[in-house]
Image (cartoon, helix red, strand yellow):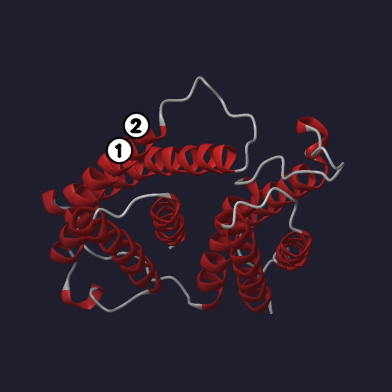
Amino acid sequence: MVHVLLALAAMVFALATGLFTARLLRFEVERSPFAEGAMVVATALLLAAAVLGLHPSGVGGSGLAVLFIAVAASVTALVLLRWGHHVVGAREDGRPVAAFPLLGPVTAAMVGMVALAMAIHTAVPPKAASAPLTVVTVMHIAATLVGYLLFAPAFVLGNLYVGQTWRLKTKQPSSSRLPALGTLEKSAWRLLTIGFLLYTLGIVGGWVSSGEADRELRPQHAVAALAWLIYAVALLRRYAFGWRGVRAAIALMAGFVVTSGAVLLYMLR
């Protein structure tokens, strides 16, 4: 039952992410009641799964902690989305603006990925790693970890780029202390390129260091491969066709969200 609730929560969070992102791409300044409503429903489902997970046969200690942290993050985001306009004020016509335009899509995407990873973890029993610790294994772990750590600041820079673009397009006050848009974009893609190379080496190293019995497809492998594909397509479009702008930055951010799900699955196995 827990994994069903988690899967439903993940789907509704995905819907909320899509609704938030669509408004973001249209540079709309008003709040999104439908997206917020979907996020409320998804948070309620996630909370119900977390409560059911308190049972001894539930998701386990570490998984339970992850669920309650995700619920707390989602509730905090909803509070800021609902009442954050008191901080930034309203439009000239009195209608409240979206105080934090990226808070909705980013939180819904990240918490939704947590819900999906926990649903997979609960439904598919994890398999303990049996491969011996070798030099290749250590290199695989190090390359993957460093690649992920480089994806994180690229994700932050992508957020800053999209946020600044949204403020400029909607004529909202923007921070003068941030670098220029071009600098934010170039820095994000440079970090992503280096991280992608290391992440690719980590995936190849993991396949080489694993034994024949460990090479069967596991959920974390599929999620990691999906993240790699998102990054690969984005980088190909970037360097082959000069892809840039808000949509390119959102693709970069989506890759990090999926990669985070793969990392969570590896940590919980």
Counting other residues with Cα less than 10 Å from the Cα at mark 2, is it few (<14), some (14-19), or many (20 or more)?
A: few
Q: Position of residue 225 (x, y in %)?
A: 31, 68
* Relative to 255, residue 154 above or below: above
- Seen from this angle, which residue lies furthest right? 94
Of 264 and 150, which appears nearest the observer?
150
Of 171 and 73, which appears nearest the observer?
171
Kindly identify which residue carries mark 1: 186
Q: Quadrant of residue 18?
A: bottom right
Disc 1 marks a residue whose amino acid type is Lys
Counting other residues with Cα less than 10 Å from the Cα at mark 1, is it few (<14), some (14-19), or many (20 or more)?
A: some
Q: Position of residue 156 (x, y in %)?
A: 45, 39
Circles 1 and 2, Cβ within 8 Å, touching? The answer is yes
Which type of secondary structure does the marked residue at label 1 adopt? helix
Q: Position of residue 122 (x, y in %)?
A: 56, 72
- Left or right placement of residue 127 versus residue 23 in this view: left
CA–CA distance in space, label 1 to label 2: 5 Å
Of 97 and 258, which appears nearest the observer?
97
Q: Residue at left 85%, top 42%?
A: 93
Quadrant in which the N terminus appears: bottom right
* Relative to 257, residue 150 above or below: above
Kindly identify which residue carries mark 2: 183
- Seen from this angle, which residue lies furthest top? 177
Which type of secondary structure does the marked residue at label 2 adopt? helix
What is the count of numbered marks? 2
- Left or right placement of residue 129 versus residue 156 in this view: left
Q: Quadrant of residue 50?
A: bottom right
Quadrant in which the C terminus appears: bottom left
Marker disc for residue 239: none
Q: Position of residue 166 (x, y in %)?
A: 56, 43
Disc 2 marks a residue whose amino acid type is Thr
Q: Residue at left 39%, top 57%?
A: 255
